[in-house]
Each structure stands twice: as C-alpha cells, then as structure tokens.
Amino acid sequence: MAAQAPSTSEVELAKLLVESNYLFKDLDVHWLAQYLSPNLTVEKLYSNRPVYTAFRPHIYLDVLYIILSGGPIIIRSTPLDRIITISYPGGCFGMRNLPFSYGQMSRAFPSLVEAYKTTDVIKLPLDNLKAIYHNSEVVRERYDHFFELREKFQYHLLNCSSYPPQAVAALLRALVYQERSLGNQPQSDGVYTFDLPVDVIARSCQLNHRTVEQVLKGMQKVKLIEVARPHDVSEDIIRVIDPEGLKETYSATRDKVSWWPLK
C-alpha cells in the first residue's frame, strides 16, 4: 500500500478509470488511486499515425495503453496489410508487448499498431500495473482475460472465408463477442454499435471495398444491421440489431445466403 494518502488528481484519475475501463470497473476509487502516479494524464493518439510496432524481437513496452474514448485502435499484419485486432474504448492494448504475465510468451511477427481514428488513452506505467495486478484478484482475472479475448478474436478471423457474407459476419461476430465479454455492450436496447469503417472491414476480411459495401447493403436489407443515421457522430457507425441472426450467415456456405446475389 502507498505510504501516504493519494492526491486529488490521483483520485480523479482513478475515478475516470473505474467509470470507463473494463480492467478497473467497480474497484474502490481510493484504493486504486494509491497505485497511480501523480503525473499520469489523458493523452491523444492521432488518426492514421503509428503508435508502435508490436512483437519486435527483444523489444518490449513499458506502459499499458488504457482506451478511454475515440478509436478504434487496430493492429496491421504484414505483408498482406491485414487488420488482426480491433480495440474500442473500455479496452486496453499493449499487454502482449509487456514483459509481464502472458506477455512474456505471447509473441508474434512484427505488426503495426495504429490509431485508426483519434483516441484518448492513459499510458499506465508497468510498475503501477504490476502493483495493481499483484494486489487485486479482480484485476488479475480481467487482465488475463484480455489475452483470451485476443486469441478468440483472431480465431473468428480464421473463419473469414472467401465467401463475402460469411467473412463480414465472422468479423461482426468477433466484435460482438469481444465487446459483450468486456461488458461494454450491448446498449440498453440490445443493439451493438460499432464505429467500423468499410476500410477496416475490408482489411480485416481481405475483401475489396465494393464487395464489403454490397454485403452491408444485403445485411441491412434483411435487418441484421443498421448503418449510420444523420445524427450519429460518425458516418461509419454500424448497428448490429440481430446478433443471433448473424450466426446463420457466419456458419453459411455458398448457396445458403439468399440475399447475396453472387453464388
């Protein structure tokens, strides 16, 4: 435990984390504040700029990125420039590049981490994270859960076949599973809402933009999804209004999706 009472700024920061992030949700604010550095601030990651290159040999991070708003944050693999991870507010990224917990063994090939849209984050130093982790069973379970979700997200992407409806449905199912597991969604009406540009879908599913647009139109026609409304803050909003209905498309093979014109 800290030797002295936390400052007002540390308490306010702890309150922000407790209210906005899965890792710290419902923790005691004053307890958490004891483990935060007084110089921690909210920082901006600007769109289409690299944050770091993940999984470089013998190179590790020294901070965990806590996502507060904006985004998404993506990871691009090479040489196909495929998006293999998508993270939204309420989540974290960087845990697989920390020399700590499963990060010590969770290695892959070098991949670019990028803020696809401007994102507000807090960079939590490794020493602070270790202290919180070792003193909270809840945080330990949640932190370890992030590693599980990363693997399951990529498992869904493995099912992105060359059949466009199934490929897009696989990505949407991956996002629904991830955000539901983190407690971020669904909304009060049961709808899952994602800021999900066509370009991100295309690079995740290895489809061209025109094909993705046609799939989304088909999904909208059969009321699996809704697209952005005039009052939405982003024109890239996609609402999954029938997440269970997506399962039929997700598991479908050719000739099994009546609304897709190309067999």
Image (tube, rainbow, N blue to C red):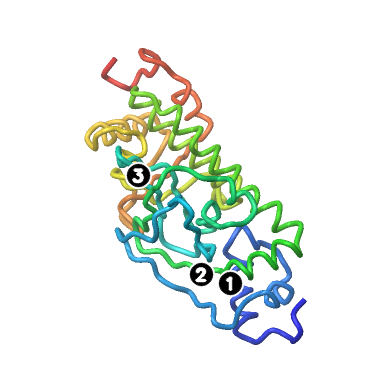
Query: Residue at label 3?
Result: 227
Is 215 situated left or right of 143 in this image? Answer: left
* Viewer-side residue, 215 vs 188: 215
**Amino acid on which disc 3 is placed:** Val
SS at mark 1? helix
| Circle nearer the N terminus (3, 1) | 1
Nearest to the eye among marks 3 and 2: give it: 2
Task: List x then y, in percent, for residue 2.
Answer: 74, 80
Q: Which residue is outermost to the front?
A: 58
**Amino acid on which disc 2 is placed:** Ile
Q: Quadrant of the N terminus?
A: bottom right
Q: Residue at x 61, y 45 (%)?
A: 181
Q: Residue at x 70, y 55 (%)?
A: 140
SS at mark 3? strand
Height in image: 121 above or below 148? below
Q: Which residue is outermost to the top?
A: 255
Is 20 situated left or right of 226 in this image? Answer: right
Q: Residue at x 31, y 33 (%)?
A: 206
Q: How many marks?
A: 3
Is 164 situated left or right of 153 in this image? Answer: left
Is 25 situated left or right of 189 in this image? Answer: right
The mark found on residue 16 in the picture is 1
Q: Residues within 10 Å of mark 2 (few under 14, many from 20)?
A: some
Query: Residue at label 2?
Result: 122
Q: Do callouts 2 and 1 mark residues in contact (Cβ within 8 Å)?
A: yes
| Circle nearer the N terminus (2, 1) | 1
How far is disc 3 from disc 2 in space, using C-alphas? 30 Å
